[in-house]
Image (cartoon, rainbow, N blue to C red):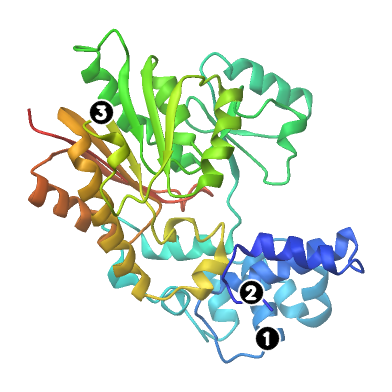
Amino acid sequence: MYIGEEPFASFLKKYFSEHKKFGSTDRKQVSHLCYCYFRLGKALPNLPVEDRILTALFFCTTTSNQLLGQIRPEWNDNVTLSVDEKYKLVGNTFSNADIFPWEKELAGGINFEQFCNSFFIQPDLFLRMRPGKEVLVKEKLLKADIAFRSMLPSAISIATTVKLDEIIEPDKEAVVQDYSSQRVAEFIEVVNAELGRRRQSDGVRVWDCCAASGGKSIMAKDILGNIELTVSDIRESILSNLKKRFAVAGIKHYKSFIADLTEPVSILSNNQFDLIVADVPCTGSGTWSRTPEQLYYFDENRIEEYCQLQKKIITTIISHLIPGGHLLYITCSVFKKENEDVIDFIKEKFHLELIKMEILKGYDKKADTMFAALLKKPL
């Protein structure tokens, strides 16, 4: 039984492995219906499971569906309606506020209606083409007859069903990286412009302190060029995976270590950095259209828990920033407590200057929504 303690994709993979009776078509259908069910979030909790699944399927469907046609033909005839019109058709039995009941907690600048409507849509897969590889990547996709949308100068989106590693060389030619995550480059470019006036011959000292999949490290390398890279994470498995990924990406010289950043980092001693990238642990609320099971199981108390964790991490890492150095704070959260409130904390307690801050909206682009802020330590 699934209770939300692991990614639903992982649970499904194990479930289908143990239950061989499901064919390929059945697995796709079961997966789709389950994800539709989660996309209703907190709405209609007392509705029978079967009815809730059908309601969710109606809201997540834009083309004729065989199951809806058999059970709810009046809905199947109207799948092209807007979300507002679908609400009316089902009798206004629920609303956006029922799906996502935390509107008051949202960061500034988010369109609540558009954000909630995005839960009904599976986001695209986004690629960041690496410098000098843009033409090659597009040529390979065209040759394989893969449709793509050009977004940012280095960003394209493709369907999530594409078997990418059969077409291009991931990490060497293009990095799988969400649209909003790629927009973090705009913040690193600000750092690059300033460092251009005082760049050291031995490279820019960069610490990706919550490295995770390493996408921000590869981005920093592509933008800043000669960097002296240090990466850390609390999970040993992450650093093991990074070693393989960095090798493909051409990052050969770097330091890595395991660290719980809620405590002082003794291994760094007095090491200081020109740029600290802090893509901190968060609720992940900006990615819930991609992982709707997290929306379904979310407990509001987690917002404050993550806010306190983020402040502890910042308190630990800030001493390793050189005077005049930059802190790039990132979350994939839409909640104010994890975003603007933490920036206020940094400014008030550590007196850093805010250079640039923005909610990176992806809900209107079939992408994630993120938050990024660039701050500078006084000289």
* N-term mark: 2 or 3: 2
Quarter holding the C terminus is: top left
Image vertical order of residue 379 relative to residue 298, above or below: above
Percent across and percent down for residue 270 are 21, 32
Distance CA(mark 2)–CA(mark 3): 46 Å
Distance CA(mark 1)–CA(mark 2): 8 Å
Residue 177 placement, left or right of 282:
right
Based on the displayed image, in which of its 4 quarters is residue 219 positioned?
top left
Marks 1 and 2 in Cβ contact (< 8 Å): yes
Residue position for label 3: 273
Mark 1: amino acid: Val
**Which mark's residue is nearer the viewer, 2 or 3?**
3
Kindly state the secondary structure of the residue where label 1 is placed: helix
Residue 250 seen anywhere in this rendered image of the structure: yes
Kindly state the secondary structure of the residue where label 2 is placed: helix
Kindly state the secondary structure of the residue where label 3 is placed: strand
Mark 2: amino acid: Tyr
Residue 146 seen anywhere in this rendered image of the structure: no
Residue 91 placement, left or right of 319:
right
Percent across and percent down for residue 323 are 12, 28
Percent across and percent down for residue 120 are 57, 64
Mark 3: amino acid: Phe
Distance CA(mark 1)–CA(mark 3): 53 Å
Residue position for label 2: 37
Q: Which mark is residue 49?
A: 1
Quarter holding the N terminus is: bottom right
